[in-house]
Image (tube, helix red, strand yellow):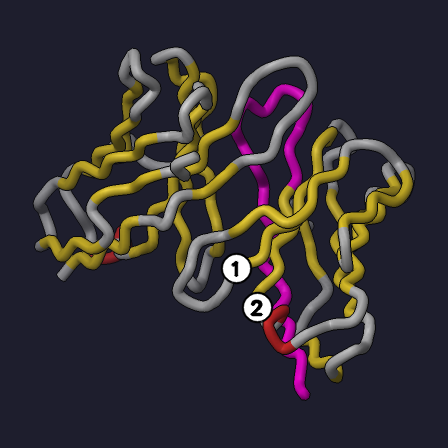
Amino acid sequence: QKEVEQNSGPLSVPEGAIASLNCTYSDRGSQSFFWYRQYSGKSPELIMSIYSNGDKEDGRFTAQLNKASQYVSLLIRDSQPSDSATYLCAVKGGTSYGKLTFGQGTILTVHP
Amino acid sequence: KAGVTQTPRYLIKTRGQQVTLSCSPISGHRSVSWYQQTPGQGLQFLFEYFSETQRNKGNFPGRFSGRQFSNSRSEMNVSTLELGDSALYLCASSFIGIGDYGYTFGSGTRLTVV
């Protein structure tokens, strides 16, 4: 079992729709959870971080965390073509200094 | 506020050579982590430094090493390069304090080994 798994893509949604990206993790001691966006040829960019169970909203992005189910998700509302990118889920354990464990990424395409 | 700066952006090296990559973190960030990104393996953690001390290390051979200086700048070195070392090498920095903080990545160094 991979440590961090993301829903297999690619994911294609029409402009204006909600894109839903999912991630499960195996280490119950994980404490910090991040979503990164990576455009082709660029480096990952942090878009959301979440540390407590529940929802966290930031503009069109909502991160959801359920530690009991070891599940974290990212919702993108009113998706735009500029949201087309690879989305990476990253998990950090409590004592894993500086170590983020990444999922394989989900490629999202938002078509006009 | 300047971001994480990595140099050089691109490198082409021959098998057997060694290479040194540099990373300057965001001002005030004392934790610097290094990652290797390849199409097949994705993003994999190499090591993390804080206050000039390596606190964590990933599952890479000893050919991969690093260090951090008193100004938090970091370097990583790869000796005896192999074709499989061709990858995007990313550095990330983070503020260390009460609570947890995200990690900001630099633009990366694209290493090609021929």
Q: Position of residue A71 (x, y in %)?
A: 82, 47
> Does A65 appear above or below B113?
above
Above or below residue B59? Residue B37 is: below
First reached walking from the N terminus: tag 1 or tag 2: 1
**Quarter that holds the N terminus of chain B:** top left
Q: What residue is shown at x 81% (from left), y 77% (from top)?
A: A17
The three-letter amino acid code for the residue at tag 2 is Ala
Q: Position of residue A91 (x, y in %)?
A: 66, 39
Q: Residue at x 68, y 88 (%)?
A: A112
Image position of B58 (left or right of B111): right
- In the rendered view, would you say B102 is above or below A80? above
Residue at 20% across, 51% down: B82
Q: Residue at x 41, y 42 (%)?
A: B35
Marks 1,2: beta carbons within 8 A: yes
Residue B93 rendering spot, x and y as whole percentages: 45, 31
Total label count? 2
Query: Which residue is disc 2 drawn over?
Result: A85
The span from disc 1 to disc 2 (Cα, nearest Å) is: 6 Å
From this viewpoint, is residue B81 visible? yes
Asked which quadrant contains residue A7, the reply is bottom right
The stretch drawn in magenta includes residue A101: yes
Which residues are drawn in magenta? A91-112
Q: Quadrant of residue A37?
A: bottom right
Q: Which residue is mark 1?
A: A38
Query: Seen from this angle, which residue lies furthest bottom?
Result: A112
When asked about the image quadrant of residue A61, the answer is bottom right
User: Looking at the picture, does residue A81 appear above or below residue B95?
Assistant: below
Amino acid marked by disc 1: Gln
Q: Quadrant of the C terminus of chain B?
A: bottom left
Please state if B71 lies on the left or on the right of A93 as rendered: left
The chain under label 2 reads: A
